[in-house]
Image (cartoon, helix red, strand yellow):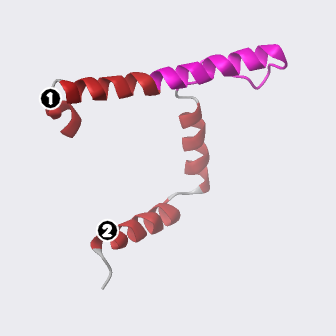
Amino acid sequence: MVPPVTLAMVLTSLATHYINTVEYTATASQSFSNSYQVYDTKDVDGAAALGQATINAIVICAVIGGMTFVIVICFYFKCMCFITG
């Protein structure tokens, strides 16, 4: 007998494989890549591109760090209503 978790994982992966179209995947990847991007480094070269890419990386790390900090504070003050929904 197949465990329920395995069955759910297989069905989810099959659903995402067959439901997603090429157009949706391209649109979603473009919108996700622009979510935390401050600078667009396509038209810039050299040191300016390196600087802009560094700033983009710092922004992503700050967002992840901030979200982690908020979750830890919620755990510390036992605010489980924010974590569980």
Per the image, the residue denoted by label 1 is 78
| Residue in the picture at 33% in, 81% down | 2
Image spot of residue 71 (x, y percent): 29, 29
Q: Check residue 54 for magenta coloring.
A: yes
Mark 1 or 2: the one toward you = 1
3D distance between C-alphas at marks 1 and 2: 29 Å
Residue type of the residue flagged with mark 1: Lys
> Which segment is the magenta one?
36-63
Image quadrant holding the C terminus, namely top left
The local secondary structure at tag 2 comes to: helix
| Residue in the picture at 15% in, 33% down | 81
Per the image, the residue denoted by label 2 is 5
Image spot of residue 7 (x, y percent): 35, 73
72 and 27: which is toward the camera? 72
| Number of residue marks | 2
Image quadrant holding the N terminus, namely bottom left
Residue type of the residue flagged with mark 2: Val
83 and 11: which is toward the camera? 83
Residue with the most extreme bottom position: 1
| Residue in the picture at 20% in, 31% down | 82
Q: Magenta-highlighted stretch: main secondary structure? A: helix
- How crowded is the residue under tag 2: few (<14 C-alpha within 10 Å), some, or many (20+)? few
- How crowded is the residue under tag 1: few (<14 C-alpha within 10 Å), some, or many (20+)? few
The local secondary structure at tag 1 comes to: loop
Image spot of residue 70 (x, y percent): 31, 24
Determine whether 10 is above or below 70 in the image: below
Determine whether 76 is above or below 33 in the image: above
